[in-house]
Every structure is written in structure tokens, then in C-alpha cells.
Image: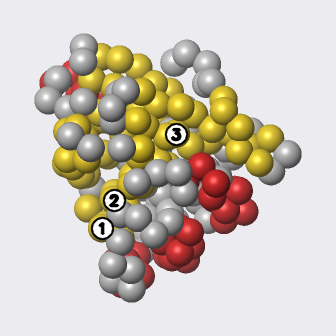
Amino acid sequence: MKIAVLSDIHDHLHNLRAFEPVIKEADALIFCGDFCAPFSLATLAELFKGPIHAVFGNNDGDQWLLSKVALRFENVRLEGPFARLELGGRAIFVVHYPEIAEDVAASGRYALVCYGHNHRAAVVKIGQTLLLNPGEVMGRFGISSIALYDTEANEAVFYSLKDGKPVIWQPSSP
């Protein structure tokens, strides 16, 4: 199973749409927080028709309206501040904040722990757990990025944008 992992859209819909070819390769999508405006959630749900599991970030202030938008789409689950998922035979934990993600990854209870917030793409193996930050769709720090996680291989491939098109990319080590 392939899972698209995204975080920190911050209403940058142009970048989100540019990743559409990669996102459509996925069987499911995990969002690690910070849609910002509810229209970003609507755009994501219109772009990807598979199951979307999303957690709230610190910039998702209007959670009531985000929840209202989510109800329009059968494929969207707003999980709250964190999510415990079972996808493709893998136990997965999702949260916005790196500090929580690091502690959960250290517990060894999950195959994959996803997070966002700091806008820095990274993947680290902690024991048998893959700790994954897909980076930021927004591109605030110069690189807009997402990840595609393969549950069978337990590996993630990162994509960034070059000339408005997604390309495979390797983030620097954390």
C-alpha cells in the first residue's frame, strides 16, 4: 500500500495541486496538520478521492468549520490532535508536533510515526520505527515537499517541486 504523507499546506493551493500526480499514486493519504483555512481541506478532498486521515495543527484555528467541510466528503476523517491508524498492515501514529512524535517513535509501538509543524522534511529510523516529516506543501523555506510511504517496503520517497512539477528529492539529514 502506498500512502501520501503531507503537512503544512497553509493555504498554498498552487503547490498542493502541483503534487497531484504523486498524490494520485497513493491508496490513502495522511495529513499532519495546518490546512489553515477550511478551503484547503476541501481542495485536498476534491483532489484525492481515497481515504484521507488528518490531524489538526497549531494553525487550524477554525476547527468547527474544518469539521463542517470534512462532513461534505465521505473520504475525509478529521482525527483530532493525533491519530492511531492501521493501514497496509502497519501501525501508524500521526501528530502535528515533533516533540510528541519523537517520544511516540521511541516507544517502538508503531511502524510509522508522522509529524509536521517545523516545515523540515526528514526521515529517521528509531529502532524499528520510521519517524517521518514530509516537509511543507507551503514552501516557506524554499522547498515544497511531500512523501510517499510504501507499507510493504517500510520506506518513504520524498518529492519536491521543480519548475512546478513534482520530482524525487532527498532531504538533508536532520
- In the image, residue 98 sits, relative to residue 130, either above or below, namely below
Find the distance from the CA under tag 2 to the CA under tag 1: 5 Å
- Nearer-N-terminus badge (2/1): 2
In the rendered image, which quarter is residue 58 located in?
A: bottom left
- What secondary structure is found at the residue carrying circle 2? strand
Q: Give the residue displayed 35% in from the left and 27% down from the top.
A: 154
| 11 lies left or right of 110 | right
Rendered image: mark on residue 53: 2
Residue, disc 1: 77
**Is the residue 152 above or below the residue 51 in the image?**
above
Q: Nearer the viewer, residue 139 or 108?
A: 108
Image location (x, y in percent) of residue 147: 52, 39
| Amino acid at circle 2 | His
Q: Residue at x 30, y 67 (%)?
A: 77
Determine whether the residue tagged by mark 1 lies in a helix, strand or loop.
strand
Residue under the point 33% across and 83% down:
71
Above or below, comparing residue 33 to residue 147 in the picture: below
46 or 106, nearer to the observer: 46
Query: What residue is shown at x 20% (from left), y 40% (from top)?
Result: 89
